[in-house]
Image (cartoon, grey):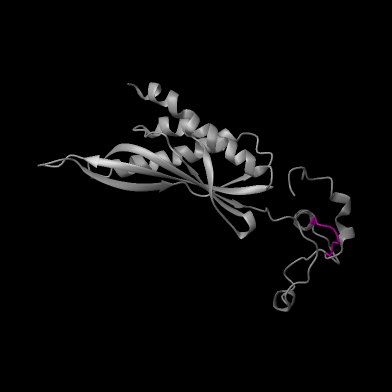
Amino acid sequence: ESEDDQSTATDNQLEFQPAEHQLGGSFQRFRLHMGRQYQDPTRFFEHLRPRLRDTVAGCLRTMTGLKLQLRVKVRFSKPSVNGPPNYADGYFNNSQRILLRGTPSIDQELDGIFQGIDNRIDGYCEGGSNWVVDEVSDAQAYVSNYQAVGGSSYIELPPAIAAKKAVVNVQNSDDRCFLWAVLSALYPASNNPQRLSRYIKYHDRLDVTDIT
């Protein structure tokens, strides 16, 4: 019976189940309860994709952003000189990935995650150890709340820095500190460079549409 034939009967069993909640729900762990094993990591990831996509989309309905890390369990085998094959388990994960609400394509982000883990599995097999993938049987997704740092308003410089008189600290009352800092560098004022009025006339020179 082929992998495709076997997967048809068990795909409906594949669903990420909440396994752990901490810090008031800002950290969550989900485990995929597999109905079968996969020998090919690529096939495993493709069957995993819709379940992980739905889990991420569901989390982004309650979070403005999240950090996602996926961990998969891989069983390796290699022949022995005398006797049955040797087996060993390995765990592989991606570097934490940030997804924001409104991410254009969750699938594109998942592609990067899957490729990163697949590369690590390949690297393990190609390291001269003679291990080959026997099965991929388990996946856990770790989700934590992510809040992007937003703009801020004027704060006084520490005395040691202010005394050097080498930093322009624009005295704004809005949340566009970054904009005013860039404008103060692009259009330096000849006197009183800390005054916001020196840069207001340049505020439309930069496109800050996607900067928050």
Closest to the observer: 206 or 110? 110
The answer to which image quadrant residue 135 occupies is: top left
Lateral position of residue 174 relative to residue 140, left or right: right
Q: Is residue 172 magenta?
A: yes
Q: Is residue 184 visible?
A: no
Predominant SS of the magenta segment: loop
Q: Is residue 83 visible?
A: yes
Q: Residue at x 69, y 42 (%)?
A: 61
Closest to the observer: 206 or 11? 11
| Residue 41: x %, y % from top left | 39, 34
Lateral position of residue 46 relative to residue 145, left or right: left
The answer to which image quadrant residue 103 occupies is: top right
Relative to 132, does residue 161 appear above or below in the rendering? below
Q: Residue at x 31, y 44 (%)?
A: 124
| Residue 43: x %, y % from top left | 41, 30
State the extent of the magenta-drawn residues as a range. Answer: 171-176
Relative to 95, does residue 57 appear above or below in the rendering? above
Closest to the observer: 106 or 31? 31
Q: Residue at x 38, y 25 (%)?
A: 6
Q: Is residue 38 magenta?
A: no
Relative to 44, does residue 130 appear above or below in the rendering? below
| Residue 19: x %, y % from top left | 52, 49
Q: Residue at x 64, y 58 (%)?
A: 24
- Give the residue at the far left of this rendering: 82
Give the quadrant of the N terminus.
top left
**In this figure, what is the number of numbered marks?**
0
The answer to which image quadrant residue 154 occupies is: bottom right
| Residue 168: x %, y % from top left | 77, 65
Closest to the observer: 105 or 34? 34
Lateral position of residue 150 relative to residue 86, left or right: right
